């Protein structure tokens, strides 16, 4: 096949080197930065591009689909769908794929965050490094993690994996989901506020639909209460971040473990100044093993599609 016979695809936003290498070997790859104007960034190639790879945080909007009239496949490096217009994709016959290979890592990190906040691990590490132990100090007590009550907001694939991990710690797991899960035995609560009221740890695992915001608000945080710990490995904009800051600073909740924020990579200074929070730069799926699986999954989707074998992991 000559270069000009090759299928043309666009990578929107940064991709890992393994992905770029694999795609360049088989396709004509146009690499552009995340932009509001994909048509301008691609120039005449926009009319020839038949596939897109990008991150869920960038997504594939209706505007991007309009700019790419011959688009057939939009392959996302992750599972979030809130910035990709699935309805518009369906109407245009564009298949959207995700990388459903990251659930274990994300659930693991939720446990890490909850343990860290309640056992004050990162805080103790800071305390030691600043010489307070050597100076004869005694680190204050944290709280027990095992056998507490764990509330899961969103019993999807991550929520289910997390629930099995929490159960192994002897935790009493319960959940709220507007679409009740028929295949789990954990008690379903009628609302997030009622769930928070009956939980020591509240884990936000909801996928969140397009435009959905502030599922966790001041009322829910107040229901979680001064002994409660909030953990978010989902999306920052599903939480009222001002209310969360206020709840943390005022002691309305005991603390929080956060991997995601409303306006990444910007994290409110009040959170950065607080000792009762653990803050991570959106790394829940960021292990070498899982990122390699995600690379392979995304590339396999594109490869399989253009080999005429359909998508491997289409979004449902
Ligand atoms: C990734 C994610 O960090 O799957 C998602 O939707 O947010 C994360 O797993 C992200 O996709 C990296 O681009």
Image (spheres, rainbow, N blue to C red):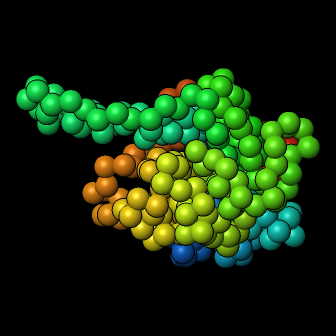
| Residue 97 higher or lower than 209, as above or below | above
Residue 229 horizontal/vertical position (percent)? 51, 48
Q: Nearer the viewer, residue 39 or 215?
A: 215
User: Which residue is farthest left?
Assistant: 135
Quadrant assignment for the N terminus: top right
Residue 216 horizontal/vertical position (percent)? 61, 64
At 51% from the left edge and 39% from the top edge, which residue is drawn?
A: 114
Quadrant in which residue 174 is drawn: top right
- Is residue 101 in view from this perspective? no
Q: Nearer the viewer, residue 316 or 159?
A: 159
Q: Nearer the viewer, residue 170 or 30?
A: 170
| Residue 61 higher or lower than 113, as above or below | below
Q: Nearer the viewer, residue 135 or 5?
A: 135
Is 220 on the left-hand or right-hand side of 121?
right
Residue 71 horizontal/vertical position (percent)? 75, 62
Residue 172 horizontal/vertical position (percent)? 70, 35
Quadrant in which residue 143 is drawn: top left
At 91% from the left edge and 43% from the top edge, which residue is drawn?
A: 182
At 60% from the left edge and 60% from the top edge, which residue is drawn?
A: 223
| Residue 167 higher or lower than 4, as above or below | above
Is 308 on the left-hand or right-hand side of 256?
right
At 52% from the left edge and 32% from the top edge, which residue is drawn?
A: 145
Is 315 on the left-hand or right-hand side of 141?
right
């Amino acid at each position: 096949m000559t270069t000009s016979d090759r299928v043309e695809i666009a990578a929107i936003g940064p991709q890992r080197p393994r992905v770029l290498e694999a795609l360049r070997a088989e396709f004509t790859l146009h690499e552009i930065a995340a932009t509001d104007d994909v048509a301008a960034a691609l120039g005449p190639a926009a009319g020839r591009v038949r596939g897109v790879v990008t991150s869920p945080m960038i997504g594939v909007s209706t505007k991007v689909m309009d700019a790419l009239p011959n688009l057939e496949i939009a392959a996302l490096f992750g599972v979030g769908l809130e910035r990709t217009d699935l309805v518009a994709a369906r109407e245009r016959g564009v298949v959207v794929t995700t990388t459903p290979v990251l659930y274990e890592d994300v659930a693991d990190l939720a446990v890490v965050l909850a343990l860290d906040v309640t056992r004050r691990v990162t805080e103790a590490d800071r305390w030691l490094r600043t010489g307070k132990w050597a100076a004869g100090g005694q680190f204050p007590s944290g709280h027990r993690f095992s056998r507490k009550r764990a509330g899961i907001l969103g019993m999807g694939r991550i929520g289910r994996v997390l629930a099995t991990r929490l159960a192994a710690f002897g935790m009493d797991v319960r959940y709220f989901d507007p679409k009740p899960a028929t295949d789990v035995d954990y008690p379903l609560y009628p609302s997030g506020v009622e769930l928070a009221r009956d939980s020591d740890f509240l884990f936000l695992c909801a996928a969140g639909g397009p435009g959905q915001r502030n599922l966790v608000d001041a009322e829910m945080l107040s229901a979680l209460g001064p002994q409660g710990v909030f953990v978010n490995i989902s999306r920052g904009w599903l939480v009222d971040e001002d209310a969360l800051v206020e709840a943390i600073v005022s002691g309305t909740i005991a603390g929080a473990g956060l991997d995601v924020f409303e306006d990444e990579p910007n994290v409110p200074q009040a959170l950065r100044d607080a000792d009762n929070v653990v803050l991570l730069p959106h790394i829940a799926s960021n292990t070498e093993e899982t990122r390699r699986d995600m690379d392979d999954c995304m590339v396999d989707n594109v490869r399989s599609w253009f080999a005429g074998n359909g998508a491997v992991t289409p979004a449902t």
